[in-house]
Amino acid sequence: MNPKEWAEKIVNGDIRAASRLMRDIDDRMPWVSDVLKELYPHTGRAYIIGVTGSPGVGKSTLVDCLIEDFRKKDQDVGVVVIDPTSPFTGGAILGDRIRMQRHSTDSGVFIRSLATRGSMGGLSRSTSDILRVMDAMGKDVILLETVGVGQDEVDVVNTAHTSMIVLIPGLGDDIQAIKAGILEIGDIFVINKCEREGAERMEREIMMMLELGARRKDGWEPKIVKTEAIKRKGIKDLMEAIEEHRAFREDPEHKRRFLRKALRIELLSNLKDQVSGRIMEALGDEEGLDTVVDEIIDGKVDLYSKSEEILKRVLC
Amino acid sequence: MAGKRKIRILVAKPGLDGHDRGAKIIARGFRDAGFEVIYTGLHQSPEQIVEAAIQEDVDVIGLSSLAGAHNHLFREVLRLLKERGAEDIPVFGGGIIPDEDIPKLKADGIREIFTPGTKVEDVVKWVEENIHPRG
């Protein structure tokens, strides 16, 4: 299949063609960039909503609720859910689908599970490209659930148009754990499992932290929403908060600022990937790399001279 | 940028019985073997399983059944795969499946059946030897 035909199939709603391209993106097959080039003109329409937070706070259940509500509004929904790859075996159990499987047979919903495959930051390296494929498939809204994050896995903020941080009351030293990093990136803070003791206190603490913190450059004042996703409570408020932020972002200046930052990051990471790919090729992949490393161990050459030499070889 | 394929496998539990211990153990075994395992949980309909397999672009589907409805459910998964033009995705099964059902299921297209007492390593080995990530 040539890239043009492949892209046409995806735009025309061929699910299998789309999911296969996603696989090839994830497996870093060299031909995907040609298909992505063809798809590019069909992208830029989907609204991407990021959902992040520690493991066990209910991200997947919230996503399940949001799918339902967006479907009621007759929106086509894409979902990307990310789970960690085991650093020891390279394997992964991707189990977020469990909470949303009831939408599996709805043709207006496409769910894809991804493993981090060694990438830090809460997303997989393939995430941006896979979001773009869903965008080209005609998804109106894409929900992006990150791995359960700790403190500084904040990549989602440069990928999603609206980022929500999910918290639950009584998780250790509440706010302490999210002080820096992820607290600064939330457009919406969701206090899930809000029936639990400490929800009010947590709300006050977040509010205080937001008031004490520096004002955001874009002028948005983050919203705090309390939910009990398992009982579908508070979802309407959450949807309203999302809509409010979305309306705020419609401002062309805000849009451009977001895009500039997002594309800078993506362009640089794309270039880095290509350059490191070429370096590996020039070295003769893993085996060649080992040979060079052995030369350094045996003192035949120093690390710095070798780096320069290799770089020269690749760039000239 | 030479890519590397990784085996993606869907582990699903069709039907009504609520025993997913076996499926979970197998899922962990696959993970430890370096596969990406999409685990969809209990009480899955054949439709849900097939849609998930397509959306996730898996290389193989593993079905677990302990409640005796395997004959119907496994065949239904095969039929739906065909209907969706995805019959190239191989399917294997495991669980409490009477010996006399096994040849019939295999004849219908279930690639392999693992009965209670099978070691996790043996299932992993079978996948490694028989399933090749898409070229």
Image (cartoon, coloured by chain):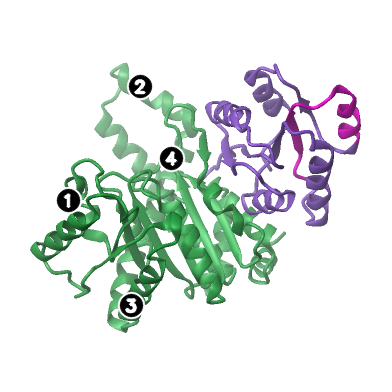
Chain colours: A green, B purple
* Picture residue at 79% right of the left edge, 55% below the top: B85
Q: Secondary structure at mark 4?
A: loop
Which three-letter amino acid code belongs to the residue tagged 4?
Pro
Looking at the rendered image, the quarter that the N terminus of chain A falls into is: bottom right
Q: Which residue matches tag 2?
A: A295
Instruction: Answer with left or right where residue B93 lies relative to residue A56.
Output: right
Q: Which residue matches tag 4?
A: A84
Nearer to us of marks 2 and 4 is: 4
Q: Which residue matches tag 1?
A: A179
Instruction: Depth check: give the residue in front, A19 or A259.
Output: A19
Instruction: Answer with left or right where residue B78 lies relative to residue A143.
Output: right
The answer to which of marks 3 and 4 sits earlier in the sequence is 4
Are dots 3 and 2 on a single chain?
Answer: yes
Instruction: Answer with left or right where residue A147 lies relative to residue A104.
Output: left
The answer to which of marks 1 and 4 sits earlier in the sequence is 4
3D distance between C-alphas at marks 1 and 3 = 25 Å
Are dots 2 and 1 on a single chain?
Answer: yes
The magenta stretch spans residue B104:
yes
Whether residue B19 is situated above or below residue A12 in the rendered picture: above
Which three-letter amino acid code belongs to the residue tagged 3?
Glu
Q: Secondary structure at mark 2?
A: helix
Q: Badge 4 sits on which subunit? A: A
Assess whether mark 2 and mark 3 are in contact (beta carbons under 8 angstroms). no
- The answer to whether any part of residue A316 appears in the image is no
- Give the label on residue A190, or none: none
Magenta residues, as a range?
Answer: B88-107
3D distance between C-alphas at marks 2 and 4 = 35 Å
3D distance between C-alphas at marks 1 and 4 = 23 Å
